[in-house]
Amino acid sequence: GAGVSQSPRYKVAKRGQDVALRCDPISGHVSLFWYQQALGQGPEFLTYFQNEAQLDKSGLPSDRFFAERPEGSVSTLKIQRTQQEDSAVYLCASSLVSGYEQYFGPGTRLTVT
Amino acid sequence: KQEVTQIPAALSVPEGENLVLNCSFTDSAIYNLQWFRQDPGKGLTSLLLIQSSQREQTSGRLNASLDKSSGRSTLYIAASQPGDSATYLCAVHDAGNMLTFGGGTRLMVKP
C-alpha cells in the first residue's frame, strides 16, 4: 500500500509566521512520530501519538510547537511565530504499533527567512 | 538519556571494497536497532531491523550485527557500488518509544 506522505514538501516562511505541516501515515498504523532533522545531523524526536492520544511530547523544543492527531490518522505539526532556528527537515514516521519498525515519510523542509 | 554515536562521520572508498560502519549506544536496555539509508533531500529508508534478542540480520549485500551488552552494532556492506553512496543512520528503540539516532556516516563510493 501507500507509504507515509507529508505535505508540503518545501515551505518557506518569514520569521514570525505560523506554519502547519501535515503527515498522512500508513493506513492502520497506530503509532505516529514526528522528528526534526537539522542540516548534517541525525533526526531528533519531537513527539509521539498512539491513535489520537499524544503520549510523549518531551522533544518539542518550545511552547511554539504543537502537534495533533484528532481522529487517530492524519497528524499536523504546527509551529507558531517561526524563528530562524526552526529551519530544518521535519520527518514523520508511523508504525503498526509501538515497538515495531518505523516507516518514514519524505519530510518537509522548512526554511525560515 | 540514550546517546548514539556513529563512526566514521564520513567515508570514501573505491567501488568494490567491503566496508564496515560502526554504531555505539550508551544504554543497552533496547528493544531493537534499525539501520537507515538517507539520500540527499530524501526521507529515511529502513535497511535492517535487529531485535534485541537477535545477533544479526542480512539483506542482500548488507549484514548488520548487534552486541547489546557492549552497546555496539556494525553495518557491513559487501562489494560496494556507487549507488550505495548515501548517509547511513543507526537508531535505537528503547523504553521511551521513540528512536534515538546517531549523527550518521556519509558514504561515497567512487567508480
Image (tube, coloured by chain):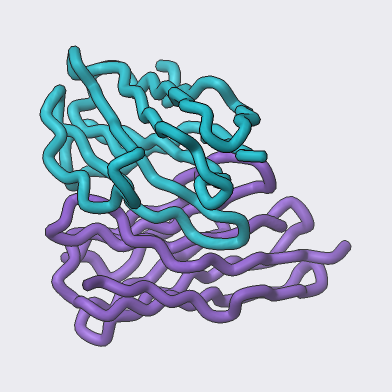
Chain colours: A cyan, B purple
**In the figure, residue A77 lies in which quadrant?**
top left
User: Between residues B19 and A72, which one lies in front from this camera angle?
Assistant: A72
Q: Which residue occupies 21% across, 52% down?
A: A58
**In the figure, residue B26 lies in which quadrant?**
bottom left
User: Between residues A58 and A50, which one lies in front from this camera angle?
Assistant: A58
Q: Position of residue B88 (x, y in %)?
A: 55, 60
Q: Position of residue A111 (x, y in %)?
A: 63, 39
Q: Which residue occupies 17% across, 65% down?
A: B53
In this image, B100 relative to B110: left or right?
left
Q: Does B30 appear above or below A77? A: below
**In the figure, residue A63 lies in which quadrant?**
top left
Extreme bottom residue here?
A: B70
Locate the N terminus of chain A by quadrant: top left
Number of on-image labels: 0
Q: Which residue occupies 48% across, 77% down?
A: B22
Q: Position of residue B7 (x, y in %)?
A: 53, 80
Q: Which residue occupies 48% across, 53% down?
A: B36
Extreme top residue here?
A: A71
- Residue B31, visible in the rendered structure: yes
